[in-house]
């Protein structure tokens, strides 16, 4: 028998029909199998407990003869030690991947422990970020550097990067519960989250006035959406709480929600909110206040009408509160016979090399809740009271509005000092 070298293997004649196997004369059990197609593969073969064990080592060309010999020697040592490398490979292949873990997490954990909206967010993180990056890795082999690499690739979308890291941490905690990883081995541990700039956008009185006018104009075309926005402004409720509000939850001057982001809660209904509700027509067979187009359903898309409304409000804001742009809006109104749209105004501004202010174009629906809270602070309401109205479970959530109370405090201080000065002056 020959010694299998690169030169020898490359010169082995290609058989016409059945494959042939040439065995090495030094390393017993190491050989090369040559097929009629010309493919040459290194193999090992040995007997243990009267059972023949055969294992592929690799393809010639991918491995050199020396590399194949070294790998073959290791495999033969395992076989003689009582280890069947084929069985070990099957066991390794059967180990769950991150993709398997994520699916189990979504199927078993999420339905029992998460609210519907949270479930949607978890699935989004899994499908868009986690599975594409880590899905093929074995659960037990995922290391902190793998998670850190994923987190780093998302550094330009910091909020989403941190949310994805949080979801991944929950998934690996559950992997430990299911016995798929050792305890306290979560690879997300000690990975520092990116700093997020908390957005605080509150509408000014001038902006609120323009928004109010835009809502009135839109009511003819999207009455359900406009109702939702009025209720959000007057109650400070979360979007999902108003969007899915059922008539049965409205009792007297309060909304009784059986479930919300923070569990069961009550939302006070003030007079303006009650007036809005009194003007909403109930649709037979539809339990929702914000009725959708489908029978018995709520309105699912509030973003589209909101984008339209905030653009209308922005044009009004330009017209009433920005002198330079107001001239442009008036000029366009004369030319086209009606108030221009946001898009028409933008185009005209580019033509005249006039930069238009953002106005209300950056206002999100959630900013209506912030505006309610900021107004509460500036009218002198206490933070604990505001927290109760908004349904905050943690005081630090409400504390983000504390700085807005500076002006009322200053006014109070001025009144007190003025009174003291007057008394001391006799």
Image (tube, grey):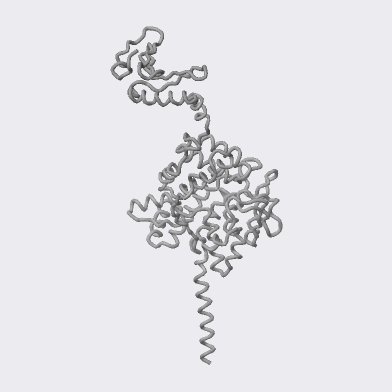
Q: Residue at x 42, y 20 (%)?
A: 44
- Using the rendered image of the protein, determine whether residue 247 is visible from the camera's viewpoint: yes
Decide: is 161 above or below 12. below
- Using the rendered image of the protein, determine whether residue 315 is visible from the camera's viewpoint: no
Q: Nearer the viewer, residue 77 or 227?
A: 77
Decide: is 229 above or below 154. below
Q: Quadrant of residue 178?
A: top right
Decide: is 141 above or below 422. above
Q: Position of residue 209 (x, y in %)?
A: 51, 61
Decide: is 333 above or below 404. above
Q: Position of residue 130 (x, y in %)?
A: 48, 40
- On screen, residue 253 versus residue 12, left or right, reads right
Determine the residue located farthest toward the left in the rendered image.
7
Q: Position of residue 123 (x, y in %)?
A: 54, 41
Q: Quadrant of residue 59?
A: top left
Q: Nearer the viewer, residue 237 or 278?
A: 237
**Mark count:** 0
Q: Point out the image quarter for the N terminus.
A: top left
- On screen, residue 22 versus residue 404, left or right, reads left
Q: Nearer the viewer, residue 242 or 17?
A: 17
Q: Residue at x 33, y 51 (%)?
A: 351
Q: Position of residue 106 (x, y in %)?
A: 57, 39
Q: Nearer the viewer, residue 2 or 61?
A: 2
Q: Residue at x 51, y 61 (%)?
A: 208
Q: Quadrant of residue 75?
A: top left
Q: Residue at x 35, y 24 (%)?
A: 63
Determine the residue located farthest toward the top in the rendered image.
16
């Amino acid at each position: 028998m020959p010694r299998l070298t690169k030169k020898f293997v490359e010169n082995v004649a290609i058989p016409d029909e059945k494959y042939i196997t040439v065995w090495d004369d030094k390393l017993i059990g190491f050989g090369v199998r040559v097929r009629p197609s010309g493919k040459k593969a290194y193999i090992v073969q040995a007997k243990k407990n009267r059972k023949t064990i055969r294992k592929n080592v690799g393809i010639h060309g991918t491995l050199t003869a020396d590399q194949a010999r070294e790998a073959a020697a290791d495999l033969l040592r395992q076989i003689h030690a009582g280890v069947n490398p084929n069985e070990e490979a099957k066991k390794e292949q059967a180990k769950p991947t991150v993709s398997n873990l994520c699916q189990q997490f979504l199927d078993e954990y999420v339905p029992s422990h998460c609210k519907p909206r949270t479930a949607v967010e978890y699935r989004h993180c899994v499908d868009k970020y986690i599975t594409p990056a880590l899905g093929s890795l074995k659960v037990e082999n995922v290391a902190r550097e793998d998670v850190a690499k994923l987190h780093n690739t998302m550094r330009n979308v910091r909020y989403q990067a941190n949310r994805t890291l949080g979801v991944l941490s929950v998934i690996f905690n559950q992997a430990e519960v299911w016995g798929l990883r050792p305890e306290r081995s979560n690879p997300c541990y000690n990975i520092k989250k990116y700093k997020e700039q908390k957005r605080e956008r509150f509408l000014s009185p001038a902006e609120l006035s323009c928004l109010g006018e835009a809502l009135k104009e839109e009511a003819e075309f999207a009455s359900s959406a406009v109702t939702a926005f009025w209720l959000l402004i007057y109650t400070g409720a979360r979007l999902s709480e108003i969007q899915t509000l059922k008539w049965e939850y409205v009792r007297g001057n309060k909304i009784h929600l059986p479930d919300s982001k923070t569990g069961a809660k009550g939302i006070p209904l003030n007079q303006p909110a009650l007036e809005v509700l009194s003007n909403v027509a109930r649709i037979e067979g539809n339990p929702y206040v914000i009725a959708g187009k489908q029978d018995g359903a709520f309105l699912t898309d509030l973003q589209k009408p909101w984008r339209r409304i905030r653009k209308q409000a922005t044009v009004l804001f330009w017209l009433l509160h920005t002198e330079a742009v107001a001239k442009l809006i008036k000029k366009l109104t004369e030319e086209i016979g009606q108030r221009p749209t946001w898009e028409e105004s933008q185009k005209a501004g580019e033509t005249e090399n006039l930069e238009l202010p953002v106005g209300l174009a950056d206002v999100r629906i959630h900013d209506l809740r912030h505006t309610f809270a900021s107004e509460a602070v500036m009218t002198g309401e206490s933070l604990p009271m505001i927290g109760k109205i908004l349904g905050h479970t943690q005081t630090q959530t409400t504390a983000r509005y504390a700085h807005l109370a500076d002006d009322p405090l200053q006014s109070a201080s001025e009144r007190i000092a003025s009174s003291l000065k007057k008394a001391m002056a006799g």
